Image (spheres, grey):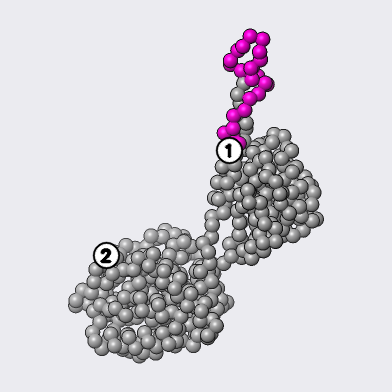
Amino acid sequence: MNARGLDADAARKLNAAGLLAVEAAPYLAAALFRVYAVAAPGLGTFAVDRGWRLYVDPDALGRWGPKLAAGVLLHEVSHLLRDHGGRQESHGAYDNELWNLAADATINADLVTAGITLPEGCVVPETLGLGSGELAETYYDALLSRFPDRQEEACASAHGPSAESESAGAGTDASGDAPGTGDGTCGSGAGGVRRAWELDDADSAAPALGPEAADLIRRRVAQEVVAHKGRGTVPGGWERWAEHTLAPPVVPWRQVLASAVRRAVAWRAGQVDYTYRRPGRRRLPRVVMPAMHRPVPTVAVVVDTSGSMGADELAAAMSEVQGVSRAVGVRGRGLQVLAVDAAVQSVSVVCDPSRIELKGGGGTDMRVGIAAAEKLQPRPGAVVVLTDGFTPWPTEPTTARLVCALIGGADSVEHARRSYPPPSWATVIEVVDAAAAA
């Protein structure tokens, strides 16, 4: 473990704590040996910044002893691995104090389960009157609900005090390397703005770790967690974190679906055809010349209302009907919805998608709905099928562009694709439920 400003005795004690931490949680070793230790006399504890610098108070290190210091070291590294700083921003958690409590509770619960020694009185979900096994975001919302008056105050100071303003009252050691006073939190690596006592990212003596390198370490640790499950006990929180970290990136399916529909409709709208409904501009003696016209883009949405579609899937389907309507910008007869199970139950012209009544609940055969959609007037340029995927598909290419949106959990969608492979000539989009995929 690289260090800056620690004397030989403190460096030896920190290395001893690091070895005990690796022994207690070997799956976190890659992260433990990647942090850059910085001496922080007067801090009173350990803390981390977003550049993976570990701020160590030598007095606290000596007072705790190797075993307890190992627990605190694992605690701080856990903040970095779980990206609590970035997640606080994503969640809009403006109250730094409550967020720090929430993040500490999730980490400490797993450390206690693993038999790690932590300082007396450390925060766990039970001390906050909360249930176990939840995310920091859940704990934060629960804590914030208890203090409704803090919400407005937290939002007003969303950007937090600047590092410069925090410097008042925050001393530095004689060498100017580190702070003399902490703020009672785990540093910006756990959440909030950069503290006055944290080093600048461009500090060459203790270089900050970039976000790309940090993500690589997270993936490596996640792989170690998965591998260690077969050799020992890993707390449930770390298992869930590893599975989420190693999961394939979630495709923004709403954008993909809207883009696919736009392309299909643009293809249709871009066609130019002849019509005899009005005379052409060119005139020949005793010959009626056709005029050119550009078809109006139209979309047909086939919604699976069979018994295998649950309430959540139907709600997602109707949400996407509204999304298609907004994305394509067509209304009235330009956007029609067909409720289909093993037969076409209803056809609706979309004026207000939220008022469409979906009928059905029997078997499943989207081929019937697709065939009916192609017979509509005006003929659609794109047919969008919203289904759980457990349906036969056409074997011949359709006249309209076919977009198949498979809705449900990740396992269910994968099973459907294997059981009923969608046509190779269709555009297939997986509308995977985020909760089921996490």
User: Which amino acid, by three-letter code, is at mark 1?
Assistant: Trp
In reply to whether residue 278 is colored magenta, the answer given is yes
| Image quarter of residue 25 | bottom left
Instruction: Please name the residue that numbered disc 1 is placed on.
Output: 267
Asked whether disc 2 touches disc 1, contact meaning CB atoms under 8 Å apart, the reply is no
Q: What stretch is highlighted in magenta?
A: 267-290
Which image quadrant: the N terminus?
bottom left
Which image quadrant: the C terminus?
bottom right
One can see residue 312 in this view = no
Q: How far apart are marks 2 and 1 (CA)?
A: 50 Å
* Residue 78: image tag: none
Residue at the limit of the structure toward the top, as seen here: 285
* Residue 202: image tag: 2
User: Residue at (73%, 37%) from the top-left corner?
Assistant: 376
x, y percent for residue 46: 35, 79
Residue at the limit of the structure toward the front, as seen here: 396
x, y percent for residue 72: 40, 82
| Image quarter of residue 294 | top right
- Secondary structure at badge 1 equals helix
Q: Which of 87 and 250 is in front in this view?
A: 250
Q: Which of 40 and 52 is in front in this view?
A: 52
Question: Is 333 located above or below residue 206 in the figure?
Answer: above
User: Residue at (46%, 61%) from the top-left corner?
Assistant: 90
User: Residue at (63%, 9%) from the top-left corner?
Assistant: 285
